[in-house]
Amino acid sequence: MIGNLLARIGGAFLALAHEVGGVVHLLFKVLIALVPPRFDRDELWRNMYKMGVRSVPIIILTAFFTGGIMVIQSSVFVKKFGATSLVGWGAGYAVFREVGPILLGLMFSGRVGSNNTAELGTMVITEQIDGLRALAIDPVNYLIVPRVLAMIVMLFLLTILGDIVAIVGAALFGQLLADVSFAAFWTSFSQNLHIVDLTHGLVKAAVFGFIVSLTSCWFGISVRGGAVGVGRAVNNSVVAAALGIVLSDYIITYTLS
């Protein structure tokens, strides 16, 4: 019994090491392709539109109600203690530093990362990537690098948009639910928050985009087992990206605090 347990633990460790090693190996290939830059720029623009512009509606919806949730959770204490001067600061601090980047990162992973894994995985099992190699086209330069850059840039920009929408939502719900005027909200927001609070969240957004891009690309190009393998890869990609986001959030928060 103990032998079976140790075998399972060893197998799980080897599987984890294989995936981590694959991601690191892919990272080195991406860095090599960037120095000097050797990637398809048209593919980069197509991916930025597909991954970023098409994600704007869901990002706006998520961010707006995220700001509202911040106020709903705090409205009880605001009414009880009359702490209207803290609403703008509390909502802005939570959105900029933690809630905004994490929620948008997870939403981005679920929508864009999973789709990217499925797309690359389908190309693998239909031998399209092998076809690129047969034509002397490097799949990393043509497919991977544009997707990695597009995800990093677009999640960074979407987080800026999401922060703005979330603050607007918080101000609106603060007026409706906590009787906090827009003037009081803005005064609390502008006087207590600093540019470092915004940059803290934007650093996280860039890192989260980097994590989502690498994990989704790796699980996509390493698909095995046909259509079933694609589904498994998508699931593993989303889980790995979520774990990476949470762990990196802790590390960045601890480092920059």
Image (cartoon, rainbow, N blue to C red):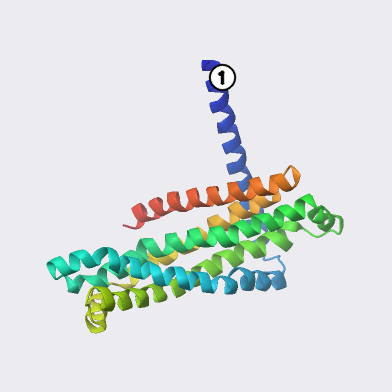
Instruction: Residue at 25%, 71% (x, y): give it.
Output: 89
Extreme residue toward the bottom, this view:
183
Residue 185 in picture, x, y percent from top left:
25, 78
Residue 201 in picture, x, y percent from top left:
40, 65
Question: Across the whole image, how many numbered discs are drawn on residues?
Answer: 1
Q: Name the residue under label 1.
A: 4
Give the left or right position of residue 85, taking residue 24 as reference. Answer: left
Residue 70 in picture, x, y percent from top left:
31, 66
The local crowd at label 1, few if under 14, some if 14 to 19, many if 20 or more residues have their Cα within 10 Å, is few
Q: Quadrant of the C terminus?
A: bottom left
Q: Could you say which is closer to the camera, residue 255 or residue 241?
A: 241
Q: Is residue 28 visible?
A: no
Instruction: Residue at 58%, 64% (x, y): give it.
Output: 151
Extreme residue toward the right, this view:
134
Q: Could you say which is closer to the camera, residue 172 or residue 44?
A: 172
Residue 92 in picture, x, y percent from top left:
31, 70
Give the left or right position of residue 158, taking residue 54 as reference. Answer: left
SS type, badge 1: helix
| Relative vertical location of residue 143 with respect to residue 187 in this rendering, above or below | above
Instruction: Residue at 24%, 65% (x, y): give it.
Output: 74
Q: Is residue 142 visible?
A: yes
Give the left or right position of residue 52, taking residue 231 as reference. Answer: left
Question: Where is residue 87, by image quadrant?
Answer: bottom left
Extreme residue toward the left, this view:
81
Give the left or right position of residue 33, taking residue 132 as reference. Answer: left
Instruction: Residue at 26%, 73% (x, y): give it.
Output: 177
Q: Could you say which is closer to the camera, residue 195 or residue 230?
A: 230
Question: Where is residue 140, by image quadrant?
Answer: bottom right
Amino acid under label 1? Asn
